[in-house]
């Protein structure tokens, strides 16, 4: 059977060019027969124009009509694009980016310089004090103990030198080989050395003896003491064992070694991010960066930063460090570029130190304030303007202290109004009674005060204030409020009464799970967290139970900023930081028990990161709040509970009291719709939204509000225009009974 090869072009000349006239439109394909290989001992010679089976000899037509674009034989397949020289500005910008800074960043930043100074003073003063205390207690007794051993070692070394002990091995070797000539030569050399060295040692001994006697007889006491101390120190140092150094170390030496490209390559290989065939690239040299190493790696094509993030533990194992020492940063210039900072030790286990607020006379809450430091020791500035903050963690990980530091900063601005409520009634927030406009502890009534009711009053009071601020800001003249927003000048104007406000609720789940007022507290907190920050009212809540039952998502989702300290599982971390945070590499469950006060911050700025919050213990907090109280008394901004001012009557009334107010004299039963309409007329700021609902949701809203008080609704029939109409309503006597029971319970408490 013959084989055929089809050509779409006519036969070519030996030089590869088509024959003349072959470019015409009428050119037809030719079919060339190939002889069968069966029975042939070899391939038949090819005729001119023939080709082996499977080979093509066709020249593609040139689509370009421009003669200047002809491609000659040997040109590359993808010719480089014409490169135009950059502009002078681009050239200078490129050189500016390539230059390394003359001075490190901490030299140029005042806060960093101050931090370095504090560290240097703390570090070297500790070292001096450490060794100064050990000189008379440890070092001098050690020297005295090692002096005899040192004197013996010195005498033995001198004796070996005088007797030419170093040449003994050569002489013994000559004896063993029975080499008389070498032995005689070495013996004569030894005799000469021993004679000379004996004379030198004797002379030195006599001179030393004379000097010692002279010092003993003629020298003053201080010089004799100095000489004895010098000799004792010399012999003590000589006699100190090599495995037990004379001087202790004032600081712990952490495991630190030089990182090389081989170690990093090995780590990426064992993590499965590269192979020997692909390899990784290092766009910049590996170098020291603070208390660690900075490594920038370009992964193979197809791998990304997310892949490296998922292999963080494997990378740590490949480098032979703890996972808490490896920090990965994304590079916006390339999806496959990974910037790693490898710490010499676990930086998160090192406390950030005492709060700088101890040295601050006052704080401007309109500006960021120091809240903590990151993993590299850089100061992290926090701000609560225009946002709400959720803090979550397991117990005893520093959640309350982290949140309290923000409240302490707010207290040092005398124009910030503080609301503080603590659901667990711990001592941590007690000292805020000095400055807080409204404050409450726990959920159990005590000394005639119901803290839950007080919280409800404060929430209603603040909700009415927020609604009023929106109206007043829109009505202020342009020269006072040019953009319709709160400004520092407006917030500090006592006549306008719109100060920055921080509403703090610690252990918020205790209030949200309250049987009687939990639902209303939730709705008010949701409103404030969603709406209030735009007019200068910030909400900060903290909880150790961020689940949907204890702290519903409708409240969590209103917080723009999240701070998660150590939690039990990555699902809980995602609950606090927001869905998808785990895929971004934010997992608070990776934090250890030793990482107290350390958390992941998200939403306060464009970048999420680690914060080691500063510590202000009970004594420090008391000092700061005492100073804050004096500031507020001086500025005349101490208000509310701090000076014994009770809330307005409209704010203290509960829905039960309001319903009792709108019930007319002699009325026994009322439809829920009618009651809601009357409530809206009584207090439109609180019930106006209810009245705008459809009839059925309107009735259900009242039913939910009265249910915690033990009041249920029932079908109530009325004849209207000769027809019987059934609607849900309440029995008015039930309201009176509920109020009586409540008052009895209060009196009993």
Image (spheres, rainbow, N blue to C red):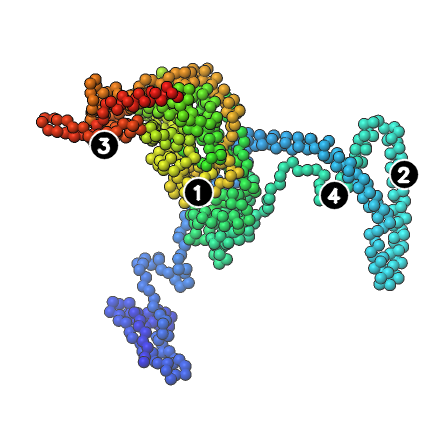
Query: What residue is rendered at 29% in x and 28% in y?
Result: 710
Q: CA distance from mark 1 to mark 4?
A: 51 Å
Circles 2 and 3: CB distance less than 8 Å?
no
Given the current orientation, which residue lies at the most extreme left position? Answer: 722
Element under label 4? loop
Query: What residue is rendered at 37% in x and 41% in y?
Result: 579
Q: Is residue 293 at least partly visible in the picture?
A: yes
Which quarter of the figure is the C terminus placed in? top left
Side of 132 where 395 appears, left or right: left
Q: Which residue is mark 3?
A: 697
Category of crowding for the residue at label 3, using alpha-carbon neighbours closer than 10 angstroms: few (below 14), some (14–19), many (at least 20): some
Which label is found at residue 202?
none
Give the percent coordinates (x, y) of residue 367: 44, 27
Q: CA distance from mark 4 to mark 3?
A: 88 Å
Q: CA distance from mark 1 to mark 2?
A: 80 Å
Is residue 657 or residue 561 the one in the foreground? 657
Q: CA distance from mark 3 to mark 1?
A: 39 Å
Give the percent coordinates (x, y) of residue 143: 76, 36
Query: What residue is rendered at 60% in x and 44% in y?
Result: 255
Query: What residue is rendered at 46% in x and 27% in y?
Result: 426
Side of 714 where 339 appears, left or right: right
Q: Which residue is mark 2?
A: 206
Category of crowding for the residue at label 4, using alpha-carbon neighbours closer than 10 angstroms: few (below 14), some (14–19), many (at least 20): few
Of labels 2 and 3, the one closer to you = 3
Side of 463 where 105 appears, left or right: right
Category of crowding for the residue at label 2, using alpha-carbon neighbours closer than 10 angstroms: few (below 14), some (14–19), many (at least 20): few
Q: Which residue is mark 4?
A: 241
Of labels 1 and 4, the one closer to you = 1
Q: Earlier in the sequence, mark 4 or mark 3?
A: 4
Q: Which residue is mark 1?
A: 569
Which quarter of the figure is the N terminus placed in? bottom left
Element under label 2? helix
């Amino acid at each position: 059977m013959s084989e055929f090869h089809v050509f779409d072009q006519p036969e070519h000349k030996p030089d590869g060019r088509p024959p003349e006239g072959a470019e015409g439109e009428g050119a037809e394909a030719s079919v060339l027969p190939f002889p069968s290989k069966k029975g042939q001992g070899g391939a038949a010679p090819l005729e001119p124009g023939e080709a082996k089976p499977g080979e093509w000899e066709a020249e593609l037509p040139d689509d370009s009509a421009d003669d200047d674009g002809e491609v000659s034989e040997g040109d590359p397949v993808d010719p480089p694009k014409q490169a135009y020289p950059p502009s002078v500005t681009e050239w200078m910008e490129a050189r500016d980016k390539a230059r390394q800074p003359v001075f490190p960043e901490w030299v140029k930043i005042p806060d960093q310089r101050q931090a370095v100074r504090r560290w240097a003073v703390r570090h070297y003063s500790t070292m001096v004090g450490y060794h100064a205390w050990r000189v008379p207690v440890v070092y001098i007794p050690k020297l005295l103990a090692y002096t005899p051993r040192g004197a013996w070692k010195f005498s033995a070394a001198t004796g070996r030198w005088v007797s030419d002990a170093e040449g003994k091995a050569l002489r013994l070797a000559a004896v063993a080989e029975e080499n008389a000539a070498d032995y005689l030569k070495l013996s004569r050399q030894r005799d000469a050395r021993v004679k000379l060295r004996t004379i030198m040692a004797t002379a030195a001994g006599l001179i030393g003896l004379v000097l010692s006697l002279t010092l003993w007889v003629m020298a003053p006491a201080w010089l004799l003491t100095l000489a004895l101390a010098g000799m004792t120190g010399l012999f003590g140092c000589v006699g100190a064992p090599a495995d037990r150094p004379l001087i202790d170390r004032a600081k712990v030496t952490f495991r630190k070694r030089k990182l090389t490209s081989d170690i990093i390559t090995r780590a990426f290989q064992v993590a499965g991010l590269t192979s020997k065939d692909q390899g990784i690239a290092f766009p910049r040299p590996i170098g020291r960066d603070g208390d660690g190493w900075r490594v920038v790696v370009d992964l193979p094509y197809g791998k990304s930063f997310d892949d490296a993030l998922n292999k963080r533990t494997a990378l740590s194992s490949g480098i032979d460090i703890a996972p808490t020492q490896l920090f990965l940063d994304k590079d916006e210039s390339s999806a496959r570029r990974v910037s790693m900072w490898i710490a010499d030790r676990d930086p998160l286990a090192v406390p950030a130190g005492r709060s700088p607020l101890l040295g601050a006379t006052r704080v401007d809450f309109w500006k960021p304030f120091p809240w903590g430091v990151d993993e590299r020791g850089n100061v992290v500035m926090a701000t609560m303007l225009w946002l709400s903050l959720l803090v979550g963690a397991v117990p005893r990980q520093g959640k309350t202290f982290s949140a309290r530091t923000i409240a302490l900063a707010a207290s040092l601005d005398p124009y910030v109004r503080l609301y503080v409520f603590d659901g667990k009634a711990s001592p941590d927030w007690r000292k805020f009674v000095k400055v807080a406009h409204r404050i409450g502890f726990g959920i159990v009534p005590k000394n005639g005060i119901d803290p839950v009711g007080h919280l409800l009053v404060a929430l209603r009071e603040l909700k009415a204030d927020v609604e009023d601020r929106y109206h007043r800001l829109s009505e202020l003249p342009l020269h006072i409020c040019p953009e319709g927003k709160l400004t520092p000048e407006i917030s500090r104007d006592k006549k306008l009464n719109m100060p920055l406000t921080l509403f703090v609720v610690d252990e918020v789940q205790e209030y949200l799970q309250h049987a009687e007022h939990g639902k209303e507290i939730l709705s008010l907190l949701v409103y404030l967290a969603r709406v209030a920050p735009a007019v200068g009212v910030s909400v900060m809540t903290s909880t150790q139970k961020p689940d949907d039952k204890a702290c519903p998502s409708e409240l969590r989702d209103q917080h723009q900023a999240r701070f998660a300290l150590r939690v039990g599982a990555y699902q809980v971390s995602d609950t606090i930081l927001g869905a998808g945070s785990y895929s971004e590499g934010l997992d608070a469950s990776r934090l250890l028990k030793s990482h107290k006060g350390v958390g992941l911050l998200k939403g306060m700025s464009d970048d999420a990161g680690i914060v080691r919050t500063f510590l202000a213990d009970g004594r420090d907090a008391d000092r700061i709040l005492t100073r804050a109280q004096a500031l507020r008394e001086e500025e005349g901004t101490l208000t509310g509970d701090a000076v014994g001012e009770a809330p307005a009557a409209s704010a203290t009334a509960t829905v039960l009291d309001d319903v009792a107010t709108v019930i007319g004299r002699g009325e026994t039963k009322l439809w829920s719709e009618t009651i809601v309409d009357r409530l809206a007329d009584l207090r439109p700021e609180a019930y106006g939204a209810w009245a705008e609902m459809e009839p059925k949701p309107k009735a259900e809203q009242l039913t939910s509000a009265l249910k915690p008080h033990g009041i249920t609704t029932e079908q109530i029939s009325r004849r209207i225009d000769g027809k019987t109409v059934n609607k849900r309503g309440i029995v008015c006597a039930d309201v009176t009974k509920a109020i009586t029971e409540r008052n009895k319970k209060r009196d009993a408490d």
